[in-house]
Amino acid sequence: MSDKGIVYLVGAGPGDLGLVTFRAKELISQADVLVYDYLVHPELVKWTRVDCEVVYVGKKAGFHSVPQEEIEALLVKHAKDGKRVVRLKGGDPFVFGRGGEEARTLAKDGIAFEVVPGVTAALAAGAYSGIPLTQRNTSSSLVFLTGHEDPTKHELQVDWRAYGALKNTTLAIYMGMGHLKFIMGELVAGGLSPETPAAVVQWASLGRQRSVAGTVSDLAERVETAALAAPAIIFVGEVVRGHEQIDWFEHLPLFGRRVVITRTRDQNSELREKLETLGAEVLELPLISITKDVARESLVEILAELGNYDWIVFTSANGVRFFFEDFLKGFPDIRALGMLRFACVGSATAREIQRHNIRVECMPDTATGESLADALIATGSMDSAKVIVVTGNLNRDSMVKKLEAASAIVDKLPLYTTSKVDLTNNPVADDFRQKGADAILFASSSAAQSFYEQSPALQLERGAKKPLGGSIGPQTTATMDEHDMPVDFEAKKPSLDALIEAMVERLTR
Protein backbone atom coordinates (compact mmCIF):
# COMPACT_ATOMS: atom_id res chain seq x y z
CA MET A 1 0.00 0.00 0.00
CA SER A 2 1.17 3.51 -0.83
CA ASP A 3 2.47 5.68 2.01
CA LYS A 4 -0.13 8.20 0.81
CA GLY A 5 -2.85 5.96 2.15
CA ILE A 6 -5.62 4.39 0.11
CA VAL A 7 -9.22 5.08 -0.90
CA TYR A 8 -11.86 2.38 -1.21
CA LEU A 9 -14.83 3.22 -3.44
CA VAL A 10 -17.41 0.95 -1.84
CA GLY A 11 -20.93 0.10 -2.94
CA ALA A 12 -23.30 0.07 0.06
CA GLY A 13 -26.05 -1.75 -1.82
CA PRO A 14 -29.70 -0.68 -2.12
CA GLY A 15 -30.57 -0.47 1.57
CA ASP A 16 -31.15 -3.94 3.01
CA LEU A 17 -28.19 -4.60 5.33
CA GLY A 18 -28.17 -8.25 4.28
CA LEU A 19 -27.19 -7.20 0.76
CA VAL A 20 -23.97 -5.47 1.84
CA THR A 21 -20.91 -7.44 0.74
CA PHE A 22 -18.52 -9.03 3.21
CA ARG A 23 -15.69 -6.95 1.75
CA ALA A 24 -17.64 -3.73 2.32
CA LYS A 25 -18.27 -4.57 5.98
CA GLU A 26 -14.62 -5.49 6.48
CA LEU A 27 -13.40 -2.18 5.04
CA ILE A 28 -15.92 -0.05 6.97
CA SER A 29 -14.75 -1.61 10.24
CA GLN A 30 -11.10 -0.82 9.38
CA ALA A 31 -11.53 2.72 8.03
CA ASP A 32 -9.75 5.77 9.41
CA VAL A 33 -12.17 8.02 7.51
CA LEU A 34 -15.68 7.20 6.24
CA VAL A 35 -17.25 9.48 3.62
CA TYR A 36 -20.87 8.54 2.95
CA ASP A 37 -23.97 9.56 0.99
CA TYR A 38 -27.67 10.15 1.67
CA LEU A 39 -28.81 6.71 0.44
CA VAL A 40 -26.46 4.76 2.70
CA HIS A 41 -28.24 2.85 5.48
CA PRO A 42 -27.42 4.66 8.77
CA GLU A 43 -26.67 1.33 10.48
CA LEU A 44 -23.56 0.95 8.26
CA VAL A 45 -22.00 4.00 9.87
CA LYS A 46 -22.13 2.20 13.23
CA TRP A 47 -19.78 -0.47 11.88
CA THR A 48 -16.88 1.97 12.07
CA ARG A 49 -14.25 2.05 14.81
CA VAL A 50 -14.82 4.48 17.67
CA ASP A 51 -11.95 6.67 16.44
CA CYS A 52 -13.02 6.71 12.78
CA GLU A 53 -13.71 10.18 11.33
CA VAL A 54 -17.18 10.11 9.78
CA VAL A 55 -18.03 12.64 7.03
CA TYR A 56 -21.56 12.98 5.65
CA VAL A 57 -21.71 14.49 2.15
CA GLY A 58 -25.49 14.14 1.85
CA LYS A 59 -26.05 13.99 -1.89
CA LYS A 60 -29.67 13.49 -2.91
CA ALA A 61 -32.01 14.64 -5.66
CA GLY A 62 -32.28 18.42 -5.70
CA PHE A 63 -29.82 18.91 -2.84
CA HIS A 64 -26.06 18.48 -2.76
CA SER A 65 -24.66 19.47 0.62
CA VAL A 66 -21.08 19.03 -0.64
CA PRO A 67 -20.15 19.67 -4.32
CA GLN A 68 -18.63 16.71 -6.17
CA GLU A 69 -15.31 18.51 -6.63
CA GLU A 70 -15.03 19.05 -2.88
CA ILE A 71 -15.80 15.40 -2.19
CA GLU A 72 -13.01 14.33 -4.52
CA ALA A 73 -10.60 16.83 -2.94
CA LEU A 74 -11.56 15.44 0.49
CA LEU A 75 -10.69 11.89 -0.58
CA VAL A 76 -7.33 12.99 -1.97
CA LYS A 77 -6.46 15.02 1.14
CA HIS A 78 -7.17 12.22 3.62
CA ALA A 79 -5.33 9.66 1.48
CA LYS A 80 -2.29 11.94 1.26
CA ASP A 81 -2.39 12.13 5.05
CA GLY A 82 -1.82 8.36 5.07
CA LYS A 83 -5.42 7.42 5.97
CA ARG A 84 -7.51 4.41 4.97
CA VAL A 85 -10.52 6.14 3.42
CA VAL A 86 -13.81 4.42 2.64
CA ARG A 87 -16.04 6.31 0.20
CA LEU A 88 -19.40 4.64 0.81
CA LYS A 89 -21.98 5.08 -1.95
CA GLY A 90 -25.53 3.76 -2.27
CA GLY A 91 -25.91 0.89 -4.73
CA ASP A 92 -22.84 0.31 -6.89
CA PRO A 93 -20.17 3.01 -7.20
CA PHE A 94 -19.86 2.54 -10.97
CA VAL A 95 -23.61 2.53 -11.80
CA PHE A 96 -24.81 6.16 -12.01
CA GLY A 97 -22.85 6.85 -8.83
CA ARG A 98 -20.05 9.10 -10.14
CA GLY A 99 -17.58 6.56 -8.84
CA GLY A 100 -15.80 6.67 -12.18
CA GLU A 101 -15.14 10.39 -11.77
CA GLU A 102 -13.75 9.83 -8.28
CA ALA A 103 -11.55 6.97 -9.50
CA ARG A 104 -10.10 9.15 -12.29
CA THR A 105 -9.33 11.95 -9.83
CA LEU A 106 -7.58 9.50 -7.50
CA ALA A 107 -5.58 8.01 -10.38
CA LYS A 108 -4.60 11.49 -11.59
CA ASP A 109 -3.29 12.36 -8.11
CA GLY A 110 -1.40 9.09 -7.76
CA ILE A 111 -3.65 7.81 -4.94
CA ALA A 112 -3.97 4.06 -4.49
CA PHE A 113 -7.59 2.93 -4.66
CA GLU A 114 -9.81 -0.13 -4.83
CA VAL A 115 -13.37 -0.44 -6.15
CA VAL A 116 -15.78 -2.68 -4.25
CA PRO A 117 -18.98 -3.44 -6.20
CA GLY A 118 -22.40 -3.26 -4.57
CA VAL A 119 -25.88 -4.49 -5.44
CA THR A 120 -27.25 -1.76 -7.68
CA ALA A 121 -30.76 -0.43 -7.01
CA ALA A 122 -32.40 -1.83 -10.17
CA LEU A 123 -31.41 -5.40 -9.28
CA ALA A 124 -32.85 -5.04 -5.78
CA ALA A 125 -35.99 -3.21 -6.94
CA GLY A 126 -36.76 -6.00 -9.40
CA ALA A 127 -36.04 -8.82 -6.96
CA TYR A 128 -37.99 -7.21 -4.08
CA SER A 129 -41.07 -6.33 -6.15
CA GLY A 130 -41.54 -9.51 -8.17
CA ILE A 131 -40.22 -8.05 -11.43
CA PRO A 132 -37.67 -10.33 -13.14
CA LEU A 133 -35.47 -8.04 -15.21
CA THR A 134 -35.09 -10.56 -18.01
CA GLN A 135 -37.39 -13.34 -19.09
CA ARG A 136 -37.26 -15.89 -21.86
CA ASN A 137 -39.46 -15.05 -24.87
CA THR A 138 -40.48 -11.59 -23.61
CA SER A 139 -37.29 -9.79 -22.55
CA SER A 140 -33.94 -10.92 -23.86
CA SER A 141 -32.11 -7.66 -23.10
CA LEU A 142 -31.86 -5.20 -20.22
CA VAL A 143 -30.94 -1.53 -20.46
CA PHE A 144 -29.97 0.71 -17.51
CA LEU A 145 -30.77 4.39 -18.13
CA THR A 146 -30.69 7.60 -16.13
CA GLY A 147 -33.41 10.21 -16.22
CA HIS A 148 -31.20 12.77 -14.52
CA GLU A 149 -30.04 15.26 -17.10
CA ASP A 150 -26.79 17.20 -16.68
CA PRO A 151 -27.90 20.81 -16.02
CA THR A 152 -24.73 22.14 -17.66
CA LYS A 153 -25.74 20.65 -21.03
CA HIS A 154 -28.59 22.02 -23.11
CA GLU A 155 -29.28 18.91 -25.19
CA LEU A 156 -30.84 15.68 -23.94
CA GLN A 157 -28.35 13.00 -22.96
CA VAL A 158 -30.82 10.17 -23.56
CA ASP A 159 -32.73 9.74 -26.83
CA TRP A 160 -35.84 8.28 -25.20
CA ARG A 161 -37.61 7.81 -28.53
CA ALA A 162 -34.85 5.52 -29.72
CA TYR A 163 -35.39 3.28 -26.68
CA GLY A 164 -39.13 3.27 -27.37
CA ALA A 165 -38.37 1.45 -30.63
CA LEU A 166 -36.57 -1.46 -28.93
CA LYS A 167 -38.27 -4.86 -28.85
CA ASN A 168 -38.12 -7.57 -26.15
CA THR A 169 -36.25 -5.21 -23.84
CA THR A 170 -36.61 -4.21 -20.20
CA LEU A 171 -35.82 -0.59 -19.40
CA ALA A 172 -34.61 0.14 -15.86
CA ILE A 173 -34.56 3.91 -15.34
CA TYR A 174 -32.69 5.54 -12.45
CA MET A 175 -33.33 9.09 -11.20
CA GLY A 176 -36.28 9.61 -13.55
CA MET A 177 -39.07 10.53 -11.15
CA GLY A 178 -38.81 14.24 -11.87
CA HIS A 179 -39.35 13.58 -15.61
CA LEU A 180 -41.61 10.51 -15.45
CA LYS A 181 -44.47 11.84 -17.56
CA PHE A 182 -42.09 13.25 -20.17
CA ILE A 183 -40.09 10.00 -20.39
CA MET A 184 -43.22 7.87 -20.83
CA GLY A 185 -44.47 10.22 -23.55
CA GLU A 186 -41.17 10.09 -25.43
CA LEU A 187 -41.10 6.28 -25.31
CA VAL A 188 -44.59 6.18 -26.84
CA ALA A 189 -43.55 8.73 -29.47
CA GLY A 190 -40.69 6.39 -30.35
CA GLY A 191 -43.06 3.53 -31.09
CA LEU A 192 -43.61 1.84 -27.72
CA SER A 193 -47.18 0.67 -27.17
CA PRO A 194 -48.99 2.80 -24.56
CA GLU A 195 -50.29 -0.48 -23.06
CA THR A 196 -46.78 -1.74 -22.28
CA PRO A 197 -46.60 -2.69 -18.55
CA ALA A 198 -44.60 -0.31 -16.37
CA ALA A 199 -43.92 0.15 -12.67
CA VAL A 200 -42.17 2.31 -10.10
CA VAL A 201 -40.46 0.87 -7.00
CA GLN A 202 -39.52 3.32 -4.23
CA TRP A 203 -37.00 2.61 -1.43
CA ALA A 204 -36.29 -0.87 -2.81
CA SER A 205 -35.44 -3.64 -0.31
CA LEU A 206 -36.39 -1.61 2.78
CA GLY A 207 -39.48 -1.89 4.96
CA ARG A 208 -40.66 1.46 3.58
CA GLN A 209 -40.65 0.06 0.02
CA ARG A 210 -43.70 0.99 -2.05
CA SER A 211 -44.53 0.07 -5.61
CA VAL A 212 -47.08 1.11 -8.20
CA ALA A 213 -47.74 -0.76 -11.46
CA GLY A 214 -49.72 0.20 -14.53
CA THR A 215 -49.00 0.90 -18.17
CA VAL A 216 -46.79 3.41 -19.91
CA SER A 217 -49.89 5.52 -20.61
CA ASP A 218 -51.13 5.79 -17.01
CA LEU A 219 -48.06 5.18 -14.81
CA ALA A 220 -47.33 8.87 -14.18
CA GLU A 221 -50.92 9.47 -13.03
CA ARG A 222 -50.88 6.39 -10.76
CA VAL A 223 -47.58 7.43 -9.21
CA GLU A 224 -48.86 10.95 -8.55
CA THR A 225 -52.00 9.56 -6.88
CA ALA A 226 -49.88 7.26 -4.68
CA ALA A 227 -47.48 10.15 -3.89
CA LEU A 228 -44.37 8.13 -4.72
CA ALA A 229 -41.13 10.07 -5.06
CA ALA A 230 -37.38 9.57 -5.29
CA PRO A 231 -35.42 7.44 -4.62
CA ALA A 232 -37.13 5.06 -7.01
CA ILE A 233 -36.52 2.86 -10.04
CA ILE A 234 -38.83 2.91 -13.08
CA PHE A 235 -39.34 -0.35 -14.99
CA VAL A 236 -40.79 -0.61 -18.49
CA GLY A 237 -41.40 -3.90 -20.27
CA GLU A 238 -43.39 -7.11 -20.38
CA VAL A 239 -41.55 -8.41 -17.30
CA VAL A 240 -43.74 -6.15 -15.15
CA ARG A 241 -46.89 -8.03 -16.15
CA GLY A 242 -48.16 -10.33 -13.41
CA HIS A 243 -45.49 -9.28 -10.95
CA GLU A 244 -47.94 -9.71 -8.04
CA GLN A 245 -47.66 -13.50 -8.39
CA ILE A 246 -44.01 -13.50 -7.33
CA ASP A 247 -43.95 -10.37 -5.20
CA TRP A 248 -42.66 -12.11 -2.06
CA PHE A 249 -41.38 -9.07 -0.15
CA GLU A 250 -44.53 -6.97 -0.04
CA HIS A 251 -46.45 -9.98 1.32
CA LEU A 252 -44.28 -10.41 4.43
CA PRO A 253 -46.25 -10.20 7.71
CA LEU A 254 -44.79 -6.83 8.79
CA PHE A 255 -44.41 -5.24 5.37
CA GLY A 256 -45.49 -1.60 5.44
CA ARG A 257 -45.34 -1.44 9.24
CA ARG A 258 -43.14 1.09 11.04
CA VAL A 259 -41.73 -0.35 14.24
CA VAL A 260 -39.73 1.65 16.79
CA ILE A 261 -37.04 -0.12 18.82
CA THR A 262 -35.49 1.31 21.95
CA ARG A 263 -32.63 -0.95 22.92
CA THR A 264 -28.92 -0.18 22.99
CA ARG A 265 -26.74 -0.32 19.87
CA ASP A 266 -25.59 -3.94 20.22
CA GLN A 267 -28.98 -5.32 21.20
CA ASN A 268 -30.67 -3.38 18.41
CA SER A 269 -28.77 -5.22 15.68
CA GLU A 270 -30.42 -8.54 16.59
CA LEU A 271 -33.91 -7.08 17.04
CA ARG A 272 -33.61 -4.96 13.89
CA GLU A 273 -32.54 -7.98 11.86
CA LYS A 274 -35.50 -10.05 13.06
CA LEU A 275 -37.99 -7.27 12.29
CA GLU A 276 -36.55 -6.45 8.87
CA THR A 277 -36.63 -10.13 7.92
CA LEU A 278 -40.40 -9.89 8.42
CA GLY A 279 -40.58 -6.80 6.19
CA ALA A 280 -40.86 -4.03 8.81
CA GLU A 281 -39.45 -0.54 8.48
CA VAL A 282 -37.40 -0.18 11.66
CA LEU A 283 -36.84 3.12 13.42
CA GLU A 284 -34.12 2.97 16.07
CA LEU A 285 -34.57 5.68 18.67
CA PRO A 286 -31.16 6.61 20.12
CA LEU A 287 -32.34 7.14 23.69
CA ILE A 288 -29.01 6.44 25.33
CA SER A 289 -25.35 6.50 24.41
CA ILE A 290 -22.71 4.27 25.91
CA THR A 291 -19.13 5.47 26.27
CA LYS A 292 -16.08 3.76 27.64
CA ASP A 293 -15.37 4.97 31.17
CA VAL A 294 -12.86 2.67 32.87
CA ALA A 295 -12.25 2.66 36.61
CA ARG A 296 -8.50 2.38 36.00
CA GLU A 297 -7.52 1.44 39.55
CA SER A 298 -10.05 -1.40 39.71
CA LEU A 299 -9.00 -2.61 36.26
CA VAL A 300 -5.31 -2.80 37.20
CA GLU A 301 -6.08 -4.66 40.43
CA ILE A 302 -8.37 -7.19 38.77
CA LEU A 303 -6.12 -7.85 35.78
CA ALA A 304 -3.16 -8.39 38.13
CA GLU A 305 -5.14 -11.06 40.01
CA LEU A 306 -6.96 -12.51 37.00
CA GLY A 307 -5.76 -16.06 37.59
CA ASN A 308 -7.41 -16.11 41.02
CA TYR A 309 -10.95 -15.52 39.75
CA ASP A 310 -13.44 -18.28 38.92
CA TRP A 311 -16.10 -16.42 36.91
CA ILE A 312 -16.43 -13.20 34.87
CA VAL A 313 -19.96 -11.92 34.29
CA PHE A 314 -21.15 -9.59 31.50
CA THR A 315 -24.55 -7.93 31.18
CA SER A 316 -23.92 -6.23 27.82
CA ALA A 317 -21.90 -6.62 24.64
CA ASN A 318 -20.38 -3.20 25.34
CA GLY A 319 -18.83 -4.54 28.52
CA VAL A 320 -17.30 -7.48 26.62
CA ARG A 321 -15.80 -5.23 23.97
CA PHE A 322 -14.38 -2.72 26.45
CA PHE A 323 -12.97 -5.50 28.66
CA PHE A 324 -11.08 -7.16 25.84
CA GLU A 325 -9.75 -3.85 24.52
CA ASP A 326 -7.93 -3.35 27.83
CA PHE A 327 -7.16 -7.01 28.49
CA LEU A 328 -5.36 -7.39 25.15
CA LYS A 329 -3.27 -4.30 25.81
CA GLY A 330 -1.75 -5.99 28.85
CA PHE A 331 -1.95 -9.64 27.76
CA PRO A 332 -1.26 -10.40 24.10
CA ASP A 333 -2.07 -14.09 24.70
CA ILE A 334 -5.69 -15.12 25.37
CA ARG A 335 -4.37 -17.95 27.57
CA ALA A 336 -3.69 -15.36 30.26
CA LEU A 337 -7.38 -15.76 31.14
CA GLY A 338 -6.44 -19.09 32.65
CA MET A 339 -9.43 -21.12 33.87
CA LEU A 340 -11.76 -18.12 34.07
CA ARG A 341 -15.34 -19.12 33.20
CA PHE A 342 -17.67 -16.79 31.28
CA ALA A 343 -21.32 -15.96 32.02
CA CYS A 344 -23.53 -13.40 30.33
CA VAL A 345 -27.03 -12.02 29.68
CA GLY A 346 -28.42 -12.18 26.14
CA SER A 347 -27.40 -13.67 22.81
CA ALA A 348 -25.81 -10.42 21.53
CA THR A 349 -23.45 -10.43 24.52
CA ALA A 350 -22.72 -14.14 24.02
CA ARG A 351 -21.81 -13.53 20.37
CA GLU A 352 -19.34 -10.82 21.36
CA ILE A 353 -17.65 -13.24 23.78
CA GLN A 354 -17.61 -16.01 21.18
CA ARG A 355 -15.77 -13.71 18.75
CA HIS A 356 -12.73 -14.43 20.92
CA ASN A 357 -13.28 -18.21 20.60
CA ILE A 358 -14.40 -18.40 24.22
CA ARG A 359 -17.32 -20.58 25.28
CA VAL A 360 -20.10 -19.06 27.36
CA GLU A 361 -20.78 -21.50 30.18
CA CYS A 362 -23.79 -19.81 31.76
CA MET A 363 -26.55 -17.80 30.08
CA PRO A 364 -30.16 -17.74 31.35
CA ASP A 365 -33.22 -18.01 29.09
CA THR A 366 -34.51 -14.74 30.52
CA ALA A 367 -32.24 -11.82 29.71
CA THR A 368 -32.05 -10.13 33.13
CA GLY A 369 -29.29 -9.77 35.71
CA GLU A 370 -31.41 -11.46 38.37
CA SER A 371 -31.99 -14.48 36.11
CA LEU A 372 -28.26 -14.71 35.44
CA ALA A 373 -27.57 -14.69 39.19
CA ASP A 374 -30.08 -17.54 39.62
CA ALA A 375 -28.46 -19.50 36.78
CA LEU A 376 -24.98 -19.07 38.29
CA ILE A 377 -26.21 -20.18 41.72
CA ALA A 378 -27.81 -23.23 40.08
CA THR A 379 -24.37 -24.35 38.86
CA GLY A 380 -23.44 -25.07 42.48
CA SER A 381 -20.14 -23.23 42.06
CA MET A 382 -20.78 -20.01 43.97
CA ASP A 383 -19.65 -21.04 47.47
CA SER A 384 -16.46 -18.97 48.05
CA ALA A 385 -16.14 -18.40 44.28
CA LYS A 386 -14.37 -15.22 43.20
CA VAL A 387 -16.51 -13.41 40.60
CA ILE A 388 -15.86 -10.35 38.42
CA VAL A 389 -19.02 -8.47 37.40
CA VAL A 390 -18.39 -6.02 34.53
CA THR A 391 -20.74 -3.08 34.97
CA GLY A 392 -21.76 0.36 33.80
CA ASN A 393 -22.87 3.34 35.84
CA LEU A 394 -26.55 2.33 35.72
CA ASN A 395 -26.25 -1.36 36.56
CA ARG A 396 -28.38 -2.37 39.53
CA ASP A 397 -26.83 -4.22 42.48
CA SER A 398 -29.55 -6.88 42.72
CA MET A 399 -27.47 -9.45 40.84
CA VAL A 400 -24.39 -8.75 42.95
CA LYS A 401 -26.41 -9.05 46.18
CA LYS A 402 -27.85 -12.40 45.07
CA LEU A 403 -24.39 -13.79 44.30
CA GLU A 404 -22.99 -12.53 47.60
CA ALA A 405 -25.94 -14.10 49.44
CA ALA A 406 -24.88 -17.40 47.82
CA SER A 407 -21.40 -16.94 49.42
CA ALA A 408 -19.64 -15.67 46.28
CA ILE A 409 -16.90 -13.04 46.59
CA VAL A 410 -17.84 -10.38 44.03
CA ASP A 411 -15.69 -7.59 42.64
CA LYS A 412 -17.33 -5.03 40.36
CA LEU A 413 -15.41 -3.69 37.36
CA PRO A 414 -16.99 -0.45 35.98
CA LEU A 415 -16.04 -0.04 32.30
CA TYR A 416 -18.65 2.23 30.71
CA THR A 417 -21.09 5.06 31.28
CA THR A 418 -24.65 5.22 29.99
CA SER A 419 -26.13 8.66 29.38
CA LYS A 420 -29.14 10.23 27.68
CA VAL A 421 -28.97 11.39 24.06
CA ASP A 422 -30.12 14.91 23.20
CA LEU A 423 -33.05 14.25 20.86
CA THR A 424 -33.88 17.89 20.09
CA ASN A 425 -32.31 17.92 16.63
CA ASN A 426 -31.87 14.19 16.13
CA PRO A 427 -33.12 13.15 12.63
CA VAL A 428 -34.50 9.78 13.80
CA ALA A 429 -36.41 11.37 16.66
CA ASP A 430 -37.70 14.03 14.27
CA ASP A 431 -38.91 11.33 11.88
CA PHE A 432 -40.76 9.68 14.78
CA ARG A 433 -42.32 12.98 15.90
CA GLN A 434 -43.58 13.72 12.38
CA LYS A 435 -44.84 10.29 11.31
CA GLY A 436 -45.20 8.17 14.43
CA ALA A 437 -45.23 4.39 14.01
CA ASP A 438 -47.40 1.28 14.17
CA ALA A 439 -45.70 -0.09 17.27
CA ILE A 440 -42.91 0.63 19.74
CA LEU A 441 -41.12 -2.26 21.43
CA PHE A 442 -39.71 -2.18 24.94
CA ALA A 443 -37.39 -5.13 25.46
CA SER A 444 -36.22 -4.13 28.94
CA SER A 445 -37.28 -2.05 31.92
CA SER A 446 -34.35 0.29 31.32
CA ALA A 447 -35.57 0.93 27.76
CA ALA A 448 -39.05 1.82 29.04
CA GLN A 449 -37.54 4.05 31.74
CA SER A 450 -35.33 5.81 29.20
CA PHE A 451 -38.28 6.41 26.86
CA TYR A 452 -40.33 7.86 29.69
CA GLU A 453 -37.51 10.19 30.71
CA GLN A 454 -37.06 11.33 27.10
CA SER A 455 -40.79 11.57 26.34
CA PRO A 456 -40.95 15.41 26.37
CA ALA A 457 -38.64 15.40 23.34
CA LEU A 458 -40.69 12.70 21.59
CA GLN A 459 -44.16 14.25 21.51
CA LEU A 460 -45.95 13.32 18.28
CA GLU A 461 -47.01 16.07 15.93
CA ARG A 462 -50.57 16.47 14.68
CA GLY A 463 -51.42 13.69 12.23
CA ALA A 464 -48.61 11.36 13.34
CA LYS A 465 -49.61 7.75 13.98
CA LYS A 466 -49.75 6.83 17.66
CA PRO A 467 -47.85 3.54 18.15
CA LEU A 468 -49.03 0.54 20.12
CA GLY A 469 -46.76 -0.23 23.08
CA GLY A 470 -45.23 -3.68 23.46
CA SER A 471 -43.51 -5.19 26.52
CA ILE A 472 -41.12 -8.15 26.65
CA GLY A 473 -42.40 -9.33 30.05
CA PRO A 474 -43.85 -8.59 33.49
CA GLN A 475 -40.86 -6.61 34.77
CA THR A 476 -40.93 -4.26 31.78
CA THR A 477 -44.72 -4.05 31.96
CA ALA A 478 -44.49 -2.99 35.62
CA THR A 479 -42.15 -0.14 34.67
CA MET A 480 -44.49 0.95 31.86
CA ASP A 481 -47.52 0.82 34.20
CA GLU A 482 -45.64 2.84 36.79
CA HIS A 483 -45.28 5.67 34.24
CA ASP A 484 -48.77 5.31 32.70
CA MET A 485 -47.29 4.09 29.42
CA PRO A 486 -49.83 2.01 27.44
CA VAL A 487 -49.13 -1.73 27.23
CA ASP A 488 -51.06 -3.00 24.21
CA PHE A 489 -49.34 -6.39 24.04
CA GLU A 490 -46.88 -8.41 26.11
CA ALA A 491 -44.65 -11.32 25.12
CA LYS A 492 -45.81 -14.70 26.41
CA LYS A 493 -42.23 -15.37 27.49
CA PRO A 494 -39.32 -12.92 27.83
CA SER A 495 -37.61 -13.29 24.45
CA LEU A 496 -37.28 -11.14 21.33
CA ASP A 497 -39.04 -13.76 19.21
CA ALA A 498 -41.98 -13.89 21.61
CA LEU A 499 -42.18 -10.09 21.69
CA ILE A 500 -42.29 -9.93 17.88
CA GLU A 501 -44.85 -12.74 17.76
CA ALA A 502 -47.10 -10.81 20.18
CA MET A 503 -46.78 -7.68 18.05
CA VAL A 504 -47.64 -9.47 14.79
CA GLU A 505 -50.67 -11.04 16.47
CA ARG A 506 -51.85 -7.66 17.78
CA LEU A 507 -51.27 -5.77 14.52
CA THR A 508 -53.07 -8.36 12.40
CA ARG A 509 -56.27 -8.55 14.46
Image (cartoon, grey):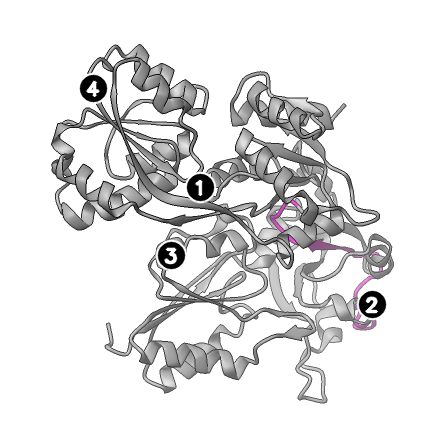
State which quadrant residue 305 falls in. Answer: top left
The residue labelled by disc 4 is: 385
Range of magenta residues: 185-207
Of residues 349 and 479, the one drawn nearer to the viewer in this rendering: 479
State which mark lies toward you, 2 or 1. 1
Of residues 159 and 380, the one drawn nearer to the viewer in this rendering: 380
As shown in the figure, which amino acid type bears the numbered disc 2? Lys
State which quadrant residue 229 falls in. Answer: bottom right
- Residue name at image x 35 percent, y 48 percent: 293
Image quadrant containing the N terminus: bottom left
Image quadrant containing the C terminus: top right
Give the mark nearer the N terminus: 4 vs 3.
3
For mark 3, give the secondary structure.
loop
Measured Cα–Cα span from mark 4 to mark 2: 74 Å
The residue labelled by disc 2 is: 181
Is residue 382 found inside the magenta-colored segment of the image?
no
Is residue 191 found inside the magenta-colored segment of the image?
yes
- Is mark 1 in CB contact (under 8 Å) with mark 4? no
Measured Cα–Cα span from mark 3 to mark 2: 47 Å
- Residue name at image x 33 percent, y 40 percent: 414
Does residue 105 sit above or below 427 in this rendering? below
Does residue 63 sit above or below 261 in this rendering? below
Does residue 404 sit above or below 131 in this rendering? above
Residue 469 on image: x %, y %: 68, 31
State which mark lies toward you, 4 or 2. 4
Residue 266's mark?
1
As shown in the figure, which amino acid type bears the numbered disc 1? Asp
Residue 444 on image: x %, y %: 53, 30
